Amino acid sequence: MPVATEISKPFWNNLNQGKLTIQQCNQCDGWVFFPRRHCSHCMAHDLEWKEVSGEGTLYSYTLTRVPTMSEFADEMPQALAVVELAQGVRVNTTLTGLDEDEIKIGMAVKPVFHQVDAKGNTLLRFTGVDKPLDKIAYQNPLDALPRNDKGQVQVSIDNSAALKALANDEFTDWSNTITVDQTLIDAFAELSGDNYWIHTDPVKAKKESPFGTTIAHGSLVQVLQSRLQFALPYEITGFGTMVNYGSDRLRFPAPVPAGSEIQARAKVKSVIQNRKGVQLTLEVHIHVVGNERPSVINDLVILYS
């Protein structure tokens, strides 16, 4: 999906509401697209968003028979197009609902609002003005997939649409809890060689530490993720190997005082397909029980191939 900027946000927000809006200059009445801060006709900084019908003509197009991105592999050939709206501006877009032999330069077209995810994010596409197509509703590709005996949806490694649909803002339920006591902290200090007093000297920490006690190493809390079992709602199938590929981001926003109980939850942040395989980024949050602020945020990258 395109990333909305401060300038373009009204365009995308209105698309999500089923409205096509473009800017018009209040000084010269000129229409402006793509979104800008100034009029492309008279340079005035006096633009207003206005709803338009979206009807226009096909200015140019090309059919791509090799996917420009893996996400488009299920829609070949992909009809990339430039549409000239009745207001005179031109929009880069794609065509839908048309056979190849129906696509003609200069043909009359109208907008199609294509909802592409469960959040309501919508892309602007076009079809022939005579077609009974105005909207394309989102169909979650996960809904039709089988589930295992744990209730997890089974997603094949070669199902691009379903893999992408795994990414959302919903966290799993909380995991089991683990107590991070001084014995565990001391054992990690001996193993890692990190014997800094804030972790290993309770007497000094009580007097001098801003936390009033020793705290666990951030790396220790991260490692304990392996003992925190949160129930993922999916199972990836059909892969040969699965490895921990690293972390895109690792932060320790809040301390874990000695004796604290910790728990974790996670969500799928992104899924990327490349030559190496499928990179699934799992955003893991580890919290001290009862604390809203996480003690660890780990964007864990898992590589399936």
Image (cartoon, rainbow, N blue to C red):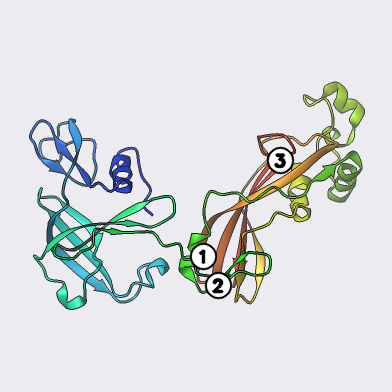
As rendered, which of 46 and 149 lies closer to the eye? 149
User: For this view, does 232 lie left or right of residue 104?
Assistant: right
Q: Could you tell me which secondary element the residue under label 1 belongs to?
A: helix
Which badge, 3 or 2, comes first in the chain's sequence? 2
Q: Could you tell me which secondary element the residue under label 3 belongs to?
A: strand
Q: Position of residue 42 (x, y in %)?
A: 10, 35
Amino acid found under the numbered disc labelled 1: Leu
As rendered, which of 53 and 236 lies closer to the eye? 53
Q: Does 113 appear above or below 72? A: above
**Residue at the spot x=17%, y=52% of the render?**
54
Amino acid found under the numbered disc labelled 3: His
**Residue at the spot x=53%, y=48% of the render?**
169
Label 3 vs label 2: CA separation? 31 Å
As rendered, which of 68 and 95 lies closer to the eye? 95
Label 2 vs label 1: CA separation? 7 Å
Residue position for label 3: 287
Dot 3 alpha-carbon crowd within 10 angstroms: few under 14, some 14 to 19, many 20 or more: many
Whether label 3 touches label 2, CB < 8 Å: no
Which of the numbered marks, if any, corresponds to residue 157? 2
Residue position for label 1: 163
Q: Position of residue 160 (x, y in %)?
A: 47, 69
Which badge, 1 or 3, comes first in the chain's sequence? 1
As rendered, which of 143 and 55 lies closer to the eye? 143
Position of the N terminus by quadrant: bottom left
Whether label 2 touches label 1, CB < 8 Å: yes
Q: Position of residue 55 (x, y in %)?
A: 14, 54
Dot 2 alpha-carbon crowd within 10 angstroms: few under 14, some 14 to 19, many 20 or more: some
Amino acid found under the numbered disc labelled 2: Ile
Q: Position of residue 244 (x, y in %)?
A: 67, 62
